Image: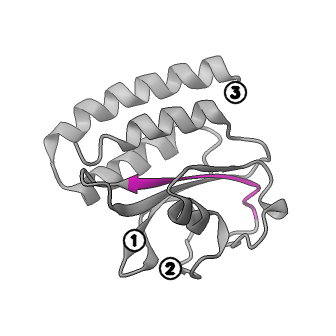
Amino acid sequence: MNDQKKEGRYQRIFLQLEELLKKTEDPLARMASICAVLHHKMDHFFWTGFYLYKEGKLIVGPYQGPVACQELEKDKGVCWAAANSGSPVVVPDVHAFPGHIACDSRSKSEITLPVFDRKGAIKAVFDVDSDHTDSFNEMDQRSLEAILELIFL
């Protein structure tokens, strides 16, 4: 999917989620809805989910797709890179990423974004895998950041 088409889809998804998420203030319920909508509307999303930051660990939370790693090894992999840096990480080829954690061998590219509450504390990492290389770019990052801001409104 080209960037123009993808951006239009993200914009429609944002509006859908903005309306849908008004029905609850619960962050976990909002995360679950975000996963479901994105996973089923974005063709290149192979695994879509959150790893919750709890007591210094990243534990699997709401997700869509194949079975996930339950807990991610501390300071290893793309999710921890986002958590530790406080910034999104886009990986065109996961096999070239040092310390990549392969929860599913079909994963080829990945984007991870830290999720912060209103006070700026990290609460989760949003993780999307694709079974194709080079699936994510800055446009995905910007669009997903806007969607993730809906969690703690």
Kind of residue at badge 3: Met
Measuring from the top left, give residue 101's x and y in whole percent: 69, 73
Residue position marked by numbered label 2 in the rendering = 70
Residues 12 and 148: in front is: 148
Please give the name of the residue rendered at 18% of the width and 55% of the height, measured from the top-left corner: 26
Kind of residue at badge 1: Tyr
The reply, left or right, for residue 117 in relation to residue 82 is left
Tell us which disc is closer to us: 1 or 2. 1
Tell us which disc is closer to us: 1 or 3. 1
Kind of residue at badge 2: Gln
The kind of secondary structure element at disc 1 is strand
User: Picture quarter containing residue 1?
Assistant: top right
Please give the name of the residue rendered at 61% of the width and 19% of the height, measured from the top-left corner: 5
Alpha-carbon distance for marks 2 and 3? 31 Å
Residues 118 and 23: in front is: 118
Measuring from the top left, give residue 105's x and y in whole percent: 76, 68
Alpha-carbon distance for marks 1 and 2? 12 Å
- As drawn, the residue found furthest toward the right would be 96
Residue position marked by numbered label 1 in the rendering = 53
Looking at the image, residue 104 lies above or below residue 140: below
Residue position marked by numbered label 3 in the rendering = 1
The kind of secondary structure element at disc 2 is loop
Q: Quadrant of the C terminus?
A: top left
Please give the name of the residue rendered at 54% of the width and 66% of the height, measured from the top-left corner: 84
Looking at the image, residue 32 lies above or below residue 103: above
Q: Which span of residues is magenta-colored?
A: 106-115
Please give the name of the residue rendered at 47% of the width and 42% of the height, measured from the top-left corner: 38
- Look at the image and say whether residue 145 sits in the magenta stretch: no
